[in-house]
Amino acid sequence: MDVRSLGYRTDLALLQLDGSVVEDRGTHLVVRTPANPSFHWGNFLLLATPPQPGSGRFWLERFEQEFPGLQHRALGVDGTTGSTDDLAALAEVGLEADASSVMTATSVHAPPHPHPTAVVRPLVSDDDWAQQVALAVAGEPEHYSEEFATSRAAAHRRNVETGHGQWFGAFLDGRLSSSLGIFTAGEGLARFQEVKTHPEARGQGLAGTLVHAASRHALDEMGARTLVMVADPGYLAIRVYRSVGFADTETQLGADRARA
């Protein structure tokens, strides 16, 4: 199965850096992350085409056959366009359908309101990465556990230390207040990961400052020609990405839920 979606192609490239395994079943891919079974979008099915009407139960059963014992359900759909209407068969069996914007940029410009005093630098020390875990869980639902955040941070740190990218932070008075990752994803692509600003520090220009700095690093130092960002089209942060030069290019479809 040849994946057309730029969002999913870069997702898979980064997951494989983390040790994920991708198995081709022809009509779909099975993506497994043995080191982190609770990671919804590290353990999922990627369908080649939108599910046919009435096929939701079939795909849920296929997921359960591939991932016995997991407490979530997650299915993506390959493609470059579409809407949540294309996921109606999955919504009918209780999954929450989502259509994200895949954004790209080949050049960037400074944000309109950069933060004037933030110290922007890569995470390097154990304390930096401990602060990354604390930032990751800040303001998140209870089910987003510190254990999960610690596992993700460890994977990101390994990828940084093996030369696949960089994790940047914006520090205010020594406190990590915003962070993101940028990693190579093959074919001149670099993919952003987990842009997050602490709830108490939002609205100050930190994310725009970080995205611009990380973009320049990827274009100048990592050999990237195209930057890729996947964003919620209904969330305010998408305006930040547009403000430094990102444009909406594709739509990425997926549906998931935690098992009741």
Image: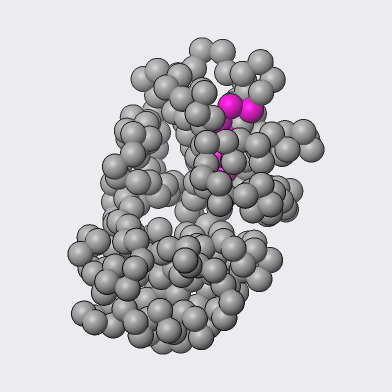
Q: Which image quarter holds the N terminus? A: bottom left
Residue 48 in the image: x percent, y percent? 34, 77
Q: In this view, does 218 lie to the left or right of 19?
A: left
Identify the residue at horizontal 35%, vertical 85% (top origin).
58
Q: Is residue 113 above or below residue 145?
A: above
Q: Quadrant of residue 125?
A: top right
Residue interval drawn in magenta: 176-183
Q: Is residue 202 magenta?
A: no
Q: Is residue 145 above or below residue 42?
A: above
Q: Is residue 155 above or below residue 137?
A: below
Q: Is residue 182 magenta?
A: yes
In the image shown, does 154 or 168 lie closer to the viewer? 154
Identify the residue at horizontal 22%, vertical 60% (top origin).
83
Q: In this view, does 157 lie to the left or right of 177?
A: right
Residue 104 in view in this figure: no
| Residue at the extreme right of the image, as rendered | 126
Residue 249 in the image: x percent, y percent? 29, 51
Residue 109 in the image: x percent, y percent? 39, 28
In the image shown, does 226 or 200 lie closer to the viewer? 200
How is the model colour-coded?
one colour
Task: Tell me the chief SS of the magenta region.
Answer: strand
Residue 199 in view in this figure: yes
In the image shown, does 121 or 106 lie closer to the viewer? 121
Q: Quadrant of residue 182?
A: top right
Q: In which quarter of the image is residue 5?
A: bottom left
Identify the residue at horizontal 59%, vertical 77% (top origin).
69
Identify the residue at horizontal 53%, vertical 83% (top origin).
66
Residue 183 in the image: x percent, y percent? 57, 50
